[in-house]
Every structure is written in structure tokens, then in C-alpha cells.
Image (tube, rainbow, N blue to C red):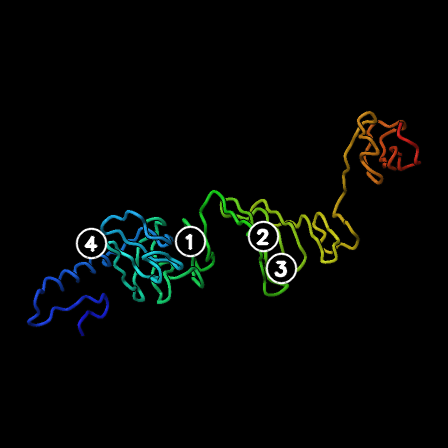
Amino acid sequence: MSTTPNLALPYLAAGQAQKHVTLNESLRRLDALVQLAVASRSLAAPPASPTEGDRYIVPAGATGAWAGRTTQIAAWQDAAWAFYAPETGWVAWLADEAGLVGFDGAGWVAAGGTLQNRPLVGVNATADTTNRLSVNAPATLLNHEGAGHQLKINKAAAADTATLLFQTGFSGRAEIGLAGTDAFSFKVSADGAAWSNAIHVAGDGKVGIGGITAPSVALQTGGPVRVAGYTVAGLPAAAAAGAGAIAFVSNEAGGAVLAFSDGAAWRRVTDRAVVA
């Protein structure tokens, strides 16, 4: 072998004349490749005025002196571009991206590989075997890419849980989603131990409120329902409220009474007389 197997440094040969030429070539390669830090991997055209020692990773589609040198390291040495083909496992620091990349045999990728199939990921936080993705941040943004965006929470079976849990001091206070059933529910708790089913939406669209978990009509409540109360003078316009709206009138002639809007006027539910 005339060169080393990894960095291709030329060996000095026995009886070789001008050994300094071979030695200097090895030093040039070492200076270019050891503790490798490149300016960029996205510059397609060689810079017009490079500085001695500048290094770049040549991207696909490069032009000029870099044409056909994709993935290679271009180093400006002795007023010319020298090119070094990377080997699998080489690592480089990207100055413009402030990050490490590694050569996987085909291209330069994030050092350590991509974030596929990682057992734990912590962002400014420590993940664990239960919370395998943990984020400490003022906010988390999930943005669209061209159109809409869906956040999906999947469970294996109807009796399992797929919910969003809201906590205070890591003690549950509210939970929404599919909690042990395929019905959608809103649950609340004052202490994280005892929970109340505030709203329950069955698969057929029927809604239960106040602990009703098997509503038999469109809206079923577990207790009294209170509608908005008004004086006669304070009633909103019947047309604006819309036909079918219900209100409690506190000072109607003859005493307090429920009233409904027919779309034009408010009428007492007791005798259909217009509220006066």
C-alpha cells in the first residue's frame, strides 16, 4: 500500500527522493480533514474569494470547479481547490448551521443519524420510559405544511384511553378525549383523585351533562337547567334571539315566567300571550 487506509496519507518510500513533497502532502490532508469544520454544505458555486484553509461540503448540482464533486470536501489550499472523498463515519461541524453532520456512506446527515426510532427524546427536558417525548418550553407549535394539520392520538381498543390531560403541579384537573370508552368526554377534578364527567358525547351525537353517560335524547342533563333571566324591558329582540329561544322573565305581569321567542315576539309558555 502506498497510502494509509483511512485518510489516504501517502507513505514515504525507502530511498525516495524529495521526501518532503510526500510529507507535505500528508500534512495538507491532515490539515484539511482532522477536526473537520466546514463553512457550509449548501453553497452550490465556489466562493469568489476563498481564504486559505476554507472548507466546504459540495452539494448536489454544484457548478464551476465543484461540478461533479457531490458530497466531497472542497478545501482551498495553495490557491487551488483540493477535493477529499469522505469515508463512512466521518464527522464535520457546519459553521452556518451550528450543528454536526456525519457521512453515512451516501450523504451527509445529522450526526448520530436521523430522529427515527429513537427510544427517548427530551427537548430542554429529560424524557423517561413513560414520557418518551418530553418538552420544557413556553409554547409548542405544530404548523401546517401547505394546507391543514391534524394532531392524532390513537388507542388500541375501546376500553383504552386516548385523551389530553391538563394538570396543576402534575395533578390532574381536566381531561378531554376518549377515556376508557369510544364516547368523547370532558372530565374535571378538584384534587386529581375524584373525577366528574361534566360532558359526555355518545357516538350517535347525543349529549349528557352533569354525570349523564348514557343520554337517550339529543341533550340530557343530570340536574336542573337554568336559562338566562331578564326583566321585560331587558329582553333581547325576539327576532335576534331566533324562534325557539327560551328566557326567564322575572317581572312579567302575573309573576315570573318562562318565555319563548316565536321569531317575532316573546310569548309566555303558560298561555302563549305576548310578554308585556
* Residue type pointed to by label 1: Gly
Q: Residues within 10 Å of mark 4 (few under 14, many from 20)?
A: few
Pick whichever of labels 4 and 2 is earlier in the sequence. 4
For label 1, the residue is 122
Viewer-side residue, 124 vs 105: 105
Give the Cα distance between marks 4 and 1: 45 Å
Q: Nearer the viewer, mark 2 or mark 3?
A: 2
Residue bearing the label numbered 4: 78
Residue carrying label 3 = 180
Given this view, does label 4 or label 2 mark the residue nearer the observer? 4
Residue 9, position as x, y percentages in the image: 19, 66
- The single residue placed furthest to the top in the displayed view is 233
Type of amino acid at the residue the image marks with label 3: Gly
Q: Name which residue type carries label 4.
A: Asp
Q: Which residue is mark 2?
A: 149
Q: Position of residue 95 (x, y in %)?
A: 32, 49
First-in-chain label (1 vs 3): 1
Local secondary structure at mark 2: loop
